[in-house]
Every structure is written in C-alpha cells, then in structure tokens.
Image (spheres, rainbow, N blue to C red):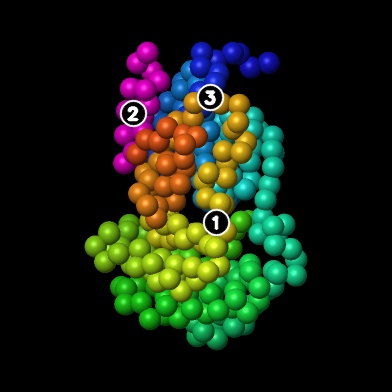
Amino acid sequence: MAAARKNAAVLALFDVDDTITAPRKEVSPEMREFMKRLREIVSVGLVGGSDLVKISEQLGKSVITDYDYVFAENGLVAHRNGELMGTQSLKTHLGDEQLKMSFQALMVILCVPVRVIFMYFLTVPTSQEIINFTLHYIADLDIPIKRGTFIEFRNGMINVSPIGRNCTQEERDDFEKYDKVRNIRPKMVSVLREKFGHLNLTFSIGGQISFDVFPKGWDKTYCLRYLEEFKEIHFFGDKTYKGGNDHEIFESNRTIGHTVSNPDDTMQQCRSIFLSK
C-alpha cells in the first residue's frame, strides 16, 4: 500500500509540452527527479492532447506508473496508478456508421504523394466538406515550407498541421517563430470556426505546429470527471490564453490555474506553492 501523502486531497496536474518538457523533447533528468519529490507531497497527474504513444516517447515507457494520473488525448484515455480507468473515442461516441475511410479524395486534393491519415468523424458529406476545405486552405497558404501529414486522426480528435507533422525539429522551431509573427494557426482557426461553427466543434491551438479539432466538451476539462475526490486541483500549462488548448481547464471553477512559460518556470512555481511550506 502506498504511503499516505501530506496533502492527499491536493492534485498538481500538468500539461506536457512547454510545461514538463520542451516541445516534443524527452523529459530532463532534473524534471524527472523533481516530479518524484513532488509526488511525495501531493498527488501528481498529467493531461496532454497527444496519444499515449507520443506522451511515452517524451516521458518514458513507465509514465503511467511514474504519475498518479495520466490523461492522454485530453483525458479520453485515462490511467490511474498504472491502471486504465476509462476510454472514449469518436467511434464510440458517434457510431460506426458515421466513421468512413477515404484516402483517395485527399490525394486528389493534395496532388502530392504524402501520407495523410483520414477518417470521417461526423456525417460523410459534412466531414468531406471540412477536410476538403481544410486541405484547400493549407494548399493556398503562403508559408516557407510544407511537409507531409497535414491531418492526423487520434482516438478522440483530429490534429491539423499547416506545415505538416513530417517536418524536422528545426523546421518545427522555425515555424513556431514564423507563426508568432504571421498568426498562421490563429487565422486558420478563426476561418474554420466561422465556416463550421454550426457543427458544435472546438478548435484548439497546441504545441508548436498544429491545432486540434474535437467535439465541444472534449477539451482538457474532460479529465476532471475522474478527479472528483480532490478538494484542490492546481493546473499548470503554457497555452492558457483563449484559443489555447489549456484555456478551458485553466478557467474551470474546478481548478486553480497557473500559467507557465517553460519547464524551469513550472518547477519554480511548484517550489513556491508546494515545497516552501
């Protein structure tokens, strides 16, 4: 049986990229040790938009046992103390009849031999309209480079990347800087919200190169349904501004939100909140 913690009713809940790790990078030894120490004082959890495979690439294969809670894909895949608590997916939510495969249409639109993972997630005509519109928009974008995998389907969301997820880390870094000046993603999200606002979807910017599309309510607040036992939940994330993928959980009345700028800032704020008492 695990030893009782000093603040058993308190949970420190963290975003991943730019909070626990640098974007898509492995966790540092210093942060790994810091989290072990913090876990002796309060319960510790992670909530990320990526799937568990990608989270494990950054935080290690033992991630689901290294933390009390690990919520992949905003909590649609939930683990507690290494055990699966629950899953949700677009397939389960919408049913098999609403999920169709179509690669050929995308290849015609793109006219290039890139790998695009594609699955309809609403009705066939409506989904086709969204995907076609998105890919036409990307094709018309005037940006320095474009790589493959512009659309990636995850368990409960679609990830859209204007530059393409096949880009190198250097290209990621360059696009992030370019995006901060040119607002490529915010402008694209604004257009999609206006065009498809009637579909009850959320468009949420995250990471360096992409944004997520998912049904409303499937943001990071989804994980809170598994955390009813806690009297106090501190959430730490970098994209807490409106339109960022940490915004909804940061603003939730269930959490105490903390905006961080990088992993070092995360550790500093946690020291002040939890370790100085």
- From the viewer's side, name the closer residue of 233 and 68: 233
| Residue type indicated by callout 2 | Gln
Q: Quadrant of the N terminus?
A: top right
Magenta run includes residue 263:
yes
Q: Main secondary structure of the magenta part?
A: helix
User: Which secondary structure lies at badge 1?
Assistant: loop
Magenta run includes residue 211:
no
Q: Name the residue carrying label 3.
A: 231
Task: Locate residue 206 relative to residue 2 in the image: left or right.
Answer: left
Which numbered disc, 3 or 1, marks the residue that appears first in the sequence? 1
Query: Which of labels 2 and 3 is toward the front?
Result: 3
- From the viewer's side, name the closer residue of 63 and 260: 260
Q: Name the residue carrying label 1.
A: 216
Residue 237 falls in image quadrant:
top left
Q: Name the residue carrying label 2.
A: 269
Task: Where is residue 6? Give x, y as percent.
Answer: 51, 13
Residue 138 falls in image quadrant:
bottom left
Q: Which residue does the image show at 52% across and 46% down from the upper left?
A: 220
| Residue type indicated by callout 1 | Lys
- Looking at the image, the residue that sits furthest to the right is 96
Task: Locate residue 135 relative to residue 75 in the image: left or right.
Answer: left
Tag 2–tag 3 contact (CB < 8 Å): no
- From the viewer's side, name the closer residue of 231 and 58: 231
Residue 127 vertical position relative to residue 261 in the rendered view, above or below: below
Q: Residues within 10 Å of mark 1 (few under 14, many from 20)?
A: few
Which numbered disc, 2 or 3, marks the residue that appears first in the sequence? 3
Q: Which residues are magenta?
A: 260-277
User: Which secondary structure lies at badge 2?
Assistant: helix
Task: Locate residue 65 relative to residue 112 in the image: left or right.
Answer: right
Residue 176 falls in image quadrant:
bottom left
Which numbered disc, 2 or 1, marks the residue that appears first in the sequence? 1
Residue 73 vertical position relative to residue 10 in the rendered view, above or below: below
